[in-house]
Image (tube, helix red, strand yellow):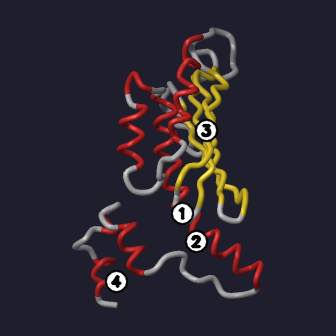
Amino acid sequence: EMLPADPDLPLLHTRNYEVRAFLKEDNVVLIRGAVMDRKPGGLYVPGDDEPLVMHHMIVEIAVSYPTMEIIEASVVFEAHPHTTCTNIVDHYGKLVGLNIARGFTHKVRELFGGPRGCTHTTALLQAMAPVAVQCFWSMQVMKARETGSSPRPPVTTEERQRMNLNTCHVWAEDGVNMARINAG
């Protein structure tokens, strides 16, 4: 488990996200993510000590580098509370062609937010996007090991600045990191 139990408080709900990235081809990464919601054993079904899985959705996307374009996408609902939940699965084909870097979160909300998608799958997609960006360096390290060379930065200083600008407090335009980069 990712979090410790609290012996003084009754558990009501557990949500887990897991995202893994695999090198599929030279410049293609397969990103596989899952979200799972569980209720503790005995809460809904008295006498049944096994946790009850309410939601289990799996998303796979293939991302092409360096364009950061999604070239394949699939969604599978392993567990869901309503028979009609799966009616939205094919709609996620609209992920193909999207850029997973800048603007992705906004586009996902626009395409799949509210009644246009599944809340759980949409939240999972937003957790998956940063993994795609973080694969840049891992790919460079892997290539360097294969060739015996030293890994080169996956992007230029200017690209790194543009990619990270205002993404969090560390990369604030008036923050220490940007000042260091601007100072050379």
The numbered mark, 4 or 1, whose residue comes first in the sequence reads: 1
Looking at the image, the residue that sits furthest to the left is 174
The alpha-carbon separation of the residues under discs 2 and 3 comes to 23 Å
Q: Which mark is residue 137?
A: 2
Check disc 2 and give the amino acid type. Trp
The answer to which of marks 2 and 4 sits earlier in the sequence is 2
Measured from the top left, where is residue 113 in percent x and y?
Answer: 39, 31
Residue 66: percent from the left, percent from the top? 55, 65
SS type, badge 1? helix
For badge 1, the amino acid type reads Gln
Apparent side of residue 7 relative to residue 150 in the rendered image (left or right) = left
CB contact under 8 Å: marks 1 and 2: yes
Of 151 and 48, nearer the camera is 151
Q: In this view, does 148 lie above or below 71?
A: below
Q: Where is residue 117 in the image (x, y as percent from the top left)?
A: 46, 27
Residue 148, by quadrant, is: bottom right
Q: How far apart are marks 2 and 4 (CA)?
A: 18 Å
Identify the residue under disc 1: 134
Q: In the figure, residue 147 lies in which quadrant?
A: bottom right
Residue 94 position, x and y percent, is 51, 36
Q: Quote the CA–CA distance across marks 3 and 1.
A: 18 Å
Q: Which residue does the image show at 47% across and 52% down from the upper left?
A: 99
Name the amino acid type tagged 4: Ile
Q: Is residue 99 above or below residue 7?
A: below
Question: What's the distance in space between the residues labelled 4 and 3, CA to CA?
Answer: 36 Å
- Look at the numbered disc 2 and give the secondary structure of its residue: helix
Q: Mark 3 points at which residue?
A: 59
